Image: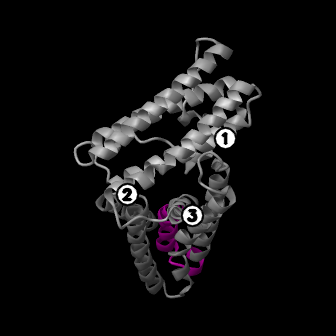
């Protein structure tokens, strides 16, 4: 959470000059070409036809890069500034090669769709910010080309999943739902559930007073929800990343952060200490396993890894709170 409160480490898209926009486009096309070749290598043995599609897409990305380099040379010379996607707020961070190996075909398809959608939005927004006519035309043409690449999902489905083709509208709506609500909400739920464990249970065992514990839990949950909500909303405007309205994402993150903390604070409205604590502990158990399930279901995290990260990590935070409260 705290890393996201330090936006100064990244540039806003609006602050980029035309030279930097072109340099960013060149670096992005080069990286996407490498990613498609990595997909091709991982799919070649089991899905050779799909591997060929990704090889062709990599060649197209290289062609785009060469066109961008030519227009950069004509306007700004030979020296291209070093600026990449990770330097600009709102861009997805691409996963390294070792995390893209052995992915299911459907996962590769969805990731390639997201890449092309983001690239198309980038070129559309970039074209609005340049004054040179030839540069604007090239960026507009690239935006149309990237939109055409989204047919990759249809091609792969027809080749490898006949009879199970999903409508484009449903796939887009589902992907947008995950980006706008599930991902920010899950991040908030994890933050609220785990980060409030130690203060709530430390207060409970230190004071033995259920009302005081409830007030501490309420303030910690609401404060964390407000902080996470504003942080998510300010992270990016969603135009290039395609993550949707910052207000919706902020609300999803903030509300779920507060819910995550209130889940184990509300039982302390019960005046009997041990009854309240037992119910709160049960709520914590359900919360942590629910988060692990959601991570596995929507975020493609291996279930055992999700259990280790969430359930085991949350248990350590809970134990730390109890030990501190009894100290």
Q: Earlier in the sequence, mark 2 or mark 3?
A: 2
Instruction: Reply yes or no: does residue 195 show up in magenta.
Output: yes
Q: Which mark is residue 32?
A: none
Foreground of the two, 261 or 233: 233
Question: What's the distance in space between the residues labelled 1 and 3, CA to CA?
Answer: 24 Å
Pointer 2 residue = 158
Pointer 3 residue = 181
Q: Which mark is residue 124?
A: 1
- Camera-nearest label, 1 or 3: 1
Q: Classify 249 as above or below 282.
A: above
Q: Earlier in the sequence, mark 2 or mark 1?
A: 1
Q: Classify 272 as above or below 176.
A: below
Q: Is residue 11 visible?
A: no
Seen at 37% across and 59% down, the residue is 313
Q: Earlier in the sequence, mark 1 or mark 3?
A: 1
Foreground of the two, 112 or 273: 112
- Camera-nearest label, 2 or 1: 2
Q: Which residues are magenta?
A: 188-213
Q: Measured from the top left, where is residue 312 in percent x and y?
A: 34, 62
Image quarter where the C terminus lies is bottom left
Secondary-structure class at tag 1 = helix
Q: Classify 147 as above or below 173.
A: above
């Amino acid at each position: 959470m705290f890393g996201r409160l330090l936006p100064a480490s990244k540039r806003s898209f609006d602050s980029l000059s035309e030279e930097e926009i072109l340099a960013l486009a060149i670096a992005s096309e080069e990286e996407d070409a490498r990613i498609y070749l990595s997909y091709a290598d991982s799919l070649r043995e089991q899905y050779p036809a799909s591997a060929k599609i990704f090889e062709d897409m990599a060649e197209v990305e290289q062609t785009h890069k060469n066109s961008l380099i030519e227009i950069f040379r004509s306007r700004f010379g030979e020296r291209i500034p070093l600026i990449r996607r990770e330097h600009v707020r709102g861009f997805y961070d691409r996963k390294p090669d070792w995390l893209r190996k052995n992915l299911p075909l459907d996962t590769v398809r969805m990731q390639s769709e997201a890449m092309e959608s983001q690239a198309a939005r980038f070129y559309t927004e970039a074209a609005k910010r340049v004054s040179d006519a030839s540069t604007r035309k090239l960026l507009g043409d690239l935006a149309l080309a990237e939109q055409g690449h989204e047919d990759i999902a249809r091609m792969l489905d027809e080749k490898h999943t006949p009879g199970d083709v999903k409508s484009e509208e449903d796939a887009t709506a589902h992907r947008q739902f995950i980006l706008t609500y599930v991902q920010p909400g899950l991040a908030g739920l994890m933050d609220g559930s785990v980060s409030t464990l130690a203060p709530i249970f430390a207060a409970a065992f230190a004071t033995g007073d259920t009302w005081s514990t409830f007030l501490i839990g309420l303030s910690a949950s609401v404060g964390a929800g407000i902080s996470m909500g504003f942080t998510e909303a300010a992270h990016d405007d969603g135009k290039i990343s395609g993550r949707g309205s910052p207000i919706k994402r902020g609300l999803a993150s903030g509300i779920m952060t507060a819910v995550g903390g209130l889940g184990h604070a509300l039982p302390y409205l019960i005046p009997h200490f041990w009854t309240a604590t037992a119910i709160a502990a049960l709520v914590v158990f359900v919360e942590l396993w629910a988060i692990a399930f959601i991570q596995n279901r929507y975020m493609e995290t291996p279930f055992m890894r999700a259990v280790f990260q969430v359930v085991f990590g949350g248990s350590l935070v809970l134990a730390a709170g109890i030990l501190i409260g009894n100290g």
